Image (cartoon, rainbow, N blue to C red):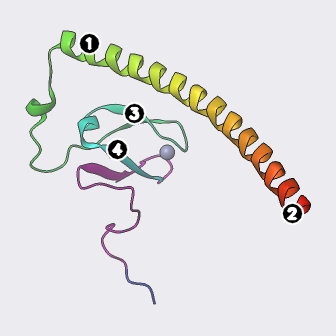
Amino acid sequence: MAEVNEGAETSAEIRDTDIVFDCPHCGKNLVIDYRGAGLEINCSQCGASVLVPIPDGMQLGDLDLEPGEILKQLFATRRNYQKAEMTIQQLKSRLVAMQEAVGVMNQVITEGLAEA
Ligand SMILES: [Zn+2]
């Protein structure tokens, strides 16, 4: 019989700071960063808008920022996202080039061994 551990250790990806709750529409177990407390998100499974619960003892004031500051963060996040996308594309083409190089080297090694 498996031991149920109060939601802990169900996934290594859940951090202490994450908020874990169930979608009230479909029951899907959702995990969100603590900074999402009190926000409305869309359920990753059913797509319904869900209000993220605010954990006991959490000071929402700590999370509240000036609208200008939030916009700045949003823009910075979007820029970082685009940069990350570009980096992924660059890494992907590097990976392809390296895989080709490895293929060529393997061929050279195989031929070299055959001749030896
Ligand atoms: Zn749902």
Quick check: marks 4 and 3 in contact, CB under 8 Å? yes
Instruction: Residue lying at the far bottom in this picture: please name it.
Output: 1
Q: Earlier in the sequence, mark 3 or mark 1?
A: 3
Q: Can you tell which of label 2 and label 1 is closer to the viewer?
A: 2
Task: Write down the residue under mark 3.
Answer: 41
Q: Badge 3, how many Cα within 10 Å: few under 14, some, many 20+?
A: some
Q: For the residue labelled by badge 1, is the local secondary structure a helix, a strand or a loop?
A: helix
- Camera-nearest residue between 112 and 101: 112
Q: CA distance from mark 3 to mark 1?
A: 20 Å
Q: Amino acid at mark 3?
A: Ile
How far apart in space, not on screen, are marks 2 and 4 (Cα)?
A: 60 Å
Lateral position of residue 18 relative to residue 92, left or right = left
Earlier in the chain: of badge 1 and badge 4, it is 4
Which is in the foreground here, disc 2 or disc 4? 2
Q: Of the residues under marks 4 and 3, which one precedes in the sequence? A: 4
**N-term mark: 2 or 3:** 3
The residues colored magenta run: 4-27
Looking at numbered disc 4 in the image, what kind of residue is underneath it? Ile
Disc 4 crowd rating (10 Å Cα; few below 14, some 14-19, many 20+) is some
**Residue 28 image position (x, y, % from top left):** 48, 53
Image location (x, y in percent) of residue 84: 47, 26
Secondary structure beneath label 2 = loop
Instruction: Write down the residue under mark 2.
Output: 116
